[in-house]
Amino acid sequence: MRFARIAVLMVAWLATGGIAPGTALAQTPAVLHVGCGSTEFDAQAYYAQELGLFKKAGLTVEIQRLRGGPDVQAAVAGGSFQIGDTNILSLAAAKQHGQSIRVIAPGAQYTAAAPTSLLVVMPDAPLHTAKDLNGRIVAGISVGGLDQLYIDAWVDKNGGDVASLKFVEVPPSAMVPALQAGRVDAASLSEPFLDMERSKLRVLARDVEAVSPNSMITAWFTTSEWAAKNPAIVKAFAEAIGEAAVWANKNPEAAAKILGKYMAIDEPRTHAQYAAKLDPALIQPILDGAAKYKLLPRAMTFAELTGTK
């Protein structure tokens, strides 16, 4: 676990009348604790920190990296962090199960121009169409998660039988070994493993695009209560994250150096693209698809997830 710490004093102007009593900034802790997962999709906070974007926005931020989204969600719910990030579908499911969730800033996104996740098989596998997957074992990072949504949508749209699929959960690092050993027939493989292992595999489908050619993968969130009490901080954080996204998309080599520093990668390369703002067109297709394939208990709107009108 690595920590990124900065210590900048947030000045309280209450005594001088600079900020009126009861405003959001007056209620915010001197240090904003932010939790994120352990993949490149979570790296916007690192970029914002290194570029001084949080400081420019008037925020003093401490970032803590955890194993993944479930740990981040638990820490935000428990109050250890004020803000965190995880994938869109996990946040929607948690909200529908009664957790206090407010999506406040965009994260990584899938773009058809630079795909970061593909459905792959072994080169000699007798699998070439969606129907060929009927009755087969397919692997993703989590049962009921984004990978399953993408695969279900692609199989369904291309004449396969979604109900016949046997979906199993496999860690990203174990996807290729599972394919090679014949334990699974197809797998949803994402970067950086896709880049590292692609020569050993054959691409069966750009399955993500069955949901949308451009869609949100992750998002930054807090609790609804904290967001309501701290609107100025939420706005400042979102603006810094958005600015970091634009910079990272335009400067992949410089971003890779920051990624290597925070994630202890010897020869880092960047693959992720980031959204600069919360856009219904990037999120609503995920919510609609998840409801269609019963990965969410009911339909959900962009406004419900983000607290917007």
Image (cartoon, helix red, strand yellow):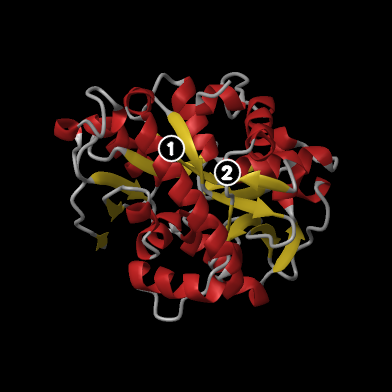
Q: Is residue 56 left or right of residue 167?
A: left
Quadrant housing residue 94: top left
Residue 118 falls in image quadrant: bottom right
Q: Is residue 199 left or right of residue 79?
A: right
Query: Whole-percent x and y of residue 139?
Result: 58, 51
Q: Amino acid at mark 2?
A: Lys
Q: Work out which quarter of the rendered image holds the N terminus and state it.
A: bottom left
Residue marked by disc 1: 235
**Residue 18 higher or lower than 258, as above or below:** above
Residue at image position (31%, 36%) is: 76
Which residue lies most toward the left here?
15
Disc 2 element: loop
Q: As shown in the figure, which amino acid type bears the numbered disc 1?
A: Lys
Of the two numbered discs 1 and 2 on the same chain, state the one appearing first in sequence. 1
Of residues 143 and 274, which is closer to you in this image?
274
Q: Residue at x 54, y 36 (%)?
A: 89
Q: Are marks 1 and 2 in contact (CB under 8 Å)?
A: no
Q: Position of residue 31 (x, y in %)?
A: 21, 46
